[in-house]
Amino acid sequence: MAAYKVGAEAGDAGCQNQVGSMYYDGDGVDVDYVQALQWTEKAAAQYHPEAVGSLGAMYHEGKGVTPSWRRAREYYERAIELGDSMAVKNMQTLTAQIAPLMDKRVEIHSTSRADMNGKRGVATDFHADTWRYTVHLDSGVAFKVKRVNVRAEGADEVEEAGEGLRFEIGQAVEAKTDEGWVGGEVVALDYREDKWPEGKTAPYQIKLSDGDGVLIFAPYDDESILRARVTEVKGKEKGKGKGKGKKGRAGHK
């Protein structure tokens, strides 16, 4: 940290980004999202591609900032223009897996308020801390609405549990963990935990075949973190190190 800090204070964008990443990950220092944000913003101001993408990840995850997927997307778009390949993957996850209705015409349904059901507007933001869209209604007012109560305008039915997922219960898979790729089996679809905001789910829960059969969940349905198991896994494929903004590991329960 000391050497990077010297370079960061001298204005080197690469060092500033590294210091921000170390504070974010707790790499050699205590986790400090305030410091992480400050140093990452300094590097991003100098158009450091990874730093700009990392700001997107911070807004994506709501760490150090108020979560806003609109802001996350803005930073990801800027990072992609600067050549950050990880931002491409994160953008795909943001728009296709978690908040596919962003900037689209939507309809509110199945809420406890009869006066809200059937109202239409545009989903303008998504908030990961509460798992809600901000919907600007045609009447001109805006509300935060649970993800489960927002659907595409004109859709007649709510998607059934597990619909559109790549794997079924009982299917053999390999999950990307902090230890690398580990074999396992899908044991639940649309998994959720009691502490999560209402409507938030993970597409899969997986029981690992490595060790004691640890249960993990896949936060989204993507080949980068969960793939079909086609061969016998022998040990673990060593994964790459931790990094801010490098979203894609299955989450330990």
Image (cartoon, helix red, strand yellow):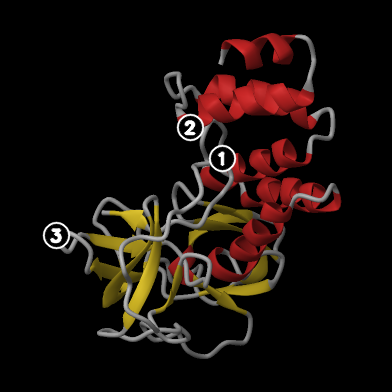
Q: Mark 1 points at which residue?
A: 244
How many numbered marks appear? 3
In this rendering, position of residue 154 left or right of residue 241:
right
Disc 1 marks a residue whose amino acid type is Lys
Lower position in the chain sequence, tag 1 or tag 3: 3
C-alpha separation, residue under disc 1 versus residue under disc 2:
7 Å
Considering the numbered disc 3 on the image, is that residue within a helix, a strand or a loop?
loop
Q: Name the residue under label 2.
A: 25
| Badge 1: residue crowd in 10 Å (few <14, some 14–19, many ≥20) | many
Disc 2 marks a residue whose amino acid type is Asp
Considering the numbered disc 1 on the image, is that residue within a helix, a strand or a loop?
loop
| Closer-to-camera residue (205/213) | 213
Rendered-image quadrant of the N terminus: top right
Query: Which residue shows up at 51% across the image and 68% down it?
Result: 116
Image coordinates for residue 222, horizontal then vertical, percent: 52, 71
Q: Name the quadrant containing residue 53.
A: top right
In this rendering, position of residue 229 left or right of residue 115:
left
Query: Which residue shows up at 61% across the image and 79% down it?
Result: 152
The label number, if any, that marks residue 212 in the structure image: 3
Lower position in the chain sequence, tag 2 or tag 3: 2
| Closer-to-camera residue (231/34) | 231
C-alpha separation, residue under disc 1 versus residue under disc 3:
29 Å
Q: In this view, does 25 lie above or below 79?
A: above
| Closer-to-camera residue (249/220) | 249
Disc 1 versus disc 3: nearer the observer: 3
C-alpha separation, residue under disc 2 versus residue under disc 3:
27 Å
